[in-house]
Amino acid sequence: MNICYLVRSFSTQAGTESYVHCMSMALARRGHTVHIVSLTGRGRRHFEGLEDQIFVHHLDFTEEAFRGSWLLDRVIPLSVWRYGQLVSHIMPDLIRRHAIDIIEATDWGMDAWAYLGKRKVPVCVRLHGYPGFKDDFDRGILKQWSKNRLLWSLFRKHLLGADLVTGVSESYIRFARNAWELKDRDIQFIPISINLDIFHPTDTPREDQAILFVGRLEESKGIAVLAHAFPLVLREMPHTKLYLAGQDYQYMDSQQTWSQHLIDVFGKDRIVYLGSLPTQELVHYYRLASICVVPSLYEPGGTAMFEAMACGCPVIVSKVGGLGEAIKDRQTGLLIQPAESKALAGASVELLQQPHLRHHISQHALDTVRCGFDINRIASQTLNAYRQAISTFKTRSN
């Protein structure tokens, strides 16, 4: 099978990009060919000897090329429209040259919306989700203004027009049905997948009193919650060290980033900013840390959580979205209410002080990942969904 992934960005360690990278290699190892079409190209990713089966096509356009008049862009989603038109323009030739059998696009990128009307092969849309959608929905502005309404309509068209829609969690599938009024749209739950050949524990001793945070350093990921929790942790355990891995963002309305602010407050001996790490370096820190915290205000799936679990690092997660769905409290992790700094601090101190509880949780979590989220199992499920979509598409076309 020849499979094409459309992903607007492929240069960072974000969850969507990690999924495409991981799934591409799993499918290539099964003898399939994968083409990845992206605005940002290959980035820092490697394909471990599978370069003759995985091909990255870099669209030679910058984000600035999609923008027009700033006044017009305030009322019309020009970037989304132009990106969709670009994808629609290049796909027919790519499909012809590489005999593509099926295309998978992201939901948040709306990569294939403009191509749907003239598609020659089936299109799958993967519901990876984005916390901003949930926030806009909760605030009642998902389709409040003209630009929002147009984006909402394009998003809905993308999902309704696809031949297959899959989602990373049952929780996010329910949200998507509600937010985009998809009552009768069939959506398959295909979980997040983890490559256990890469993400697995070792016998190397963990650093004592080390907390790891993996994700964008922005409020939706709970960085502010963690910032308020950390001094409470230090009050009980003054030698605790906090490792931050992910893209840095502006701290509030200041000129600083979050990492700079936290280092200024707590010092370099307590805060270590690692930046956006390639996979192998990230694995090292999952194996190094005593615990991994995922205090997101909302999380459709939670790739970092599963990666930590696979590496034997016990997790503390917010009881939201796909996080709360996947974790059994005090069995495979500790669950806390979102935006509760005191709860995060208390759970962190408890785990840091109780190695037996950490061991209990990490063992059960590892079993859970091995049974339900192994990339080999999820790749088989994905291929079955693709084959069914291709079969149905051919039947309808005839």
Image: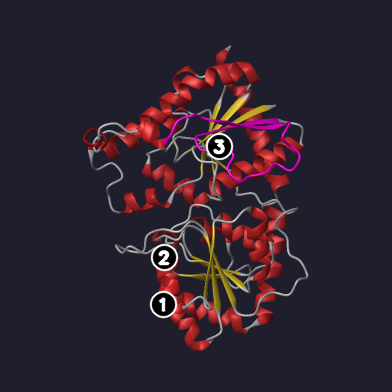
C-alpha gap between disc 1 and disc 3: 37 Å
Residue 258 badge:
2
Disc with the residue nearer the chain's start (1 vs 2): 2
> Does residue 120 appear anywhere in the picture?
no
Q: Residue 29 at x, y = what percent?
A: 76, 38
Question: Residue tagged by mark 3?
Answer: 41
Q: Residues within 10 Å of mark 2 (few under 14, many from 20)?
A: many
Residue lying furthest top = 398
Asked where in the image residue 202 lies, by quadrant, the reply is bottom right
Residue visible at 45% across and 38% down? 109
- Looking at the rendered image, the quarter that the C terminus falls into is top right
Q: Is disc 1 in contact with disc 2, using a CB cutoff of under 8 Å?
A: no
Tag 1 secondary structure? helix
In this orientation, which residue lies closer to the viewer: 48 or 14?
48
Question: What main secondary structure does the magenta stretch of the protein show?
Answer: loop
Q: Which residues are magenta?
A: 33-62
C-alpha gap between disc 3 and disc 2: 27 Å
Disc with the residue nearer the chain's start (1 vs 3): 3
Amino acid type at circle 1 is Val
Q: Residues within 10 Å of mark 1 (few under 14, many from 20)?
A: few
> Does residue 216 appear anywhere in the picture?
yes
> Does residue 295 sit above or below 231 in this rendering?
above
> Does residue 38 sit above or below 96 in this rendering?
below
Question: Residue tagged by mark 1?
Answer: 265
C-alpha gap between disc 1 and disc 2: 11 Å
Amino acid type at circle 2 is Trp
